[in-house]
Amino acid sequence: MTPELLLAVMEATWGPASATRQGPWTIRNGLGGGKRVSAATAEGDWQDTDISQAETAMAALDQPALFLIRDGDGLLDQALMARGYRIVDPVVAYAAPLATLPQAPDAITTFPHWPPMAIAADLWAEGGIGPARLAVMERVQGPKTTILARAQDRAAGTAFVAIHDNIAMLHALEVTPSQRRQGSAHNILRAAAAWAQNNGADTLSLVVTVANDPARRLYASLGMQAVGQYHYRQK
């Protein structure tokens, strides 16, 4: 998966409220939906003096100065570091062909549905995924679903999945602390893969912070491979 394709899938399945081209930058208005929908990216040639243009545009949206740094953005990374920007949330992208992933779990363990049930919203809220991020999900066009997981006769976890260009991407995976290590995250991944296949996708992908070792071990155990990486620079 190329950096350009990774960004395109992210943008389509977890996108900003709006994105505008201003000089050599794409400026995103995230409406409080988090870093991924609020970060600026460089598009083509830029000069060091152009960075202030992006900073001004983000300030006008009442957003912090935040840039997404992909493979190939090394010069921008250095320029921002020299301006006092720090690295935030290094991220790894994982992907796997759906045909190689385990089969769907027992039907009683997961429930794909849309729009999200109130219990799914409650589970997300426990993990800090509030209305602004639910609004991100609402904005997504094309096939999408919520996966609700059950364990020990109660709702245990949830995730959001959407498809772009035959690639499904999973977002906002959250398992309530009291239900962790019960297999819910594993079941959500398998259910997401089954739903994606039934809706015309051929690949499942996701992004996770480098620091989240338990999640990365889970994805590797399912045969998912690291296919890209990026990080943010924040003033």
Image (cartoon, rainbow, N blue to C red):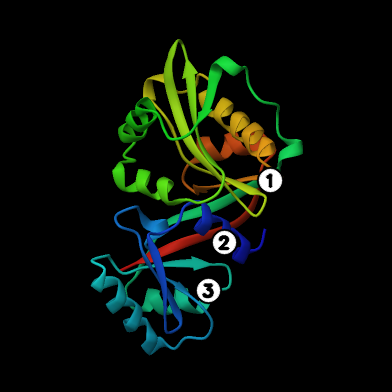
Q: Which numbered disc flags the more N-terminal residue, 2 or 1? A: 2
- When the figure is inspected, residue 151 is found, relative to residue 72, above or below; the finding is above
Residue 124 versus residue 215: which sits nearer the camera? Answer: 124
Q: Name the residue under label 2.
A: 8
Residue 203 versus residue 179: which sits nearer the camera? Answer: 203
Label annotation for residue 104: none
Bin the neighbour count of mark 1 within 10 Å (Cα to Cα): few under 14, some 14-19, many 20 and up: many
Which amino acid does the dot numbered 2 rest on?
Ala
Q: Name the residue under label 1.
A: 203
Name the secondary structure under disc 1. Answer: strand
Residue 74 x, y percent position in the rendering: 52, 74
Q: Which numbered disc flags the more N-terminal residue, 3 or 1? A: 3
- When the figure is inspected, residue 128 is found, relative to residue 228, above or below; the finding is above
Q: Nearer the viewer, mark 2 or mark 3?
A: 2
Q: Which numbered disc flags the more N-terminal residue, 2 or 3? A: 2
Q: In which quarter of the image is residue 174?
A: top left
Separation of residues labelled 2 and 1 (CA atoms) = 14 Å
Label annotation for residue 73: 3
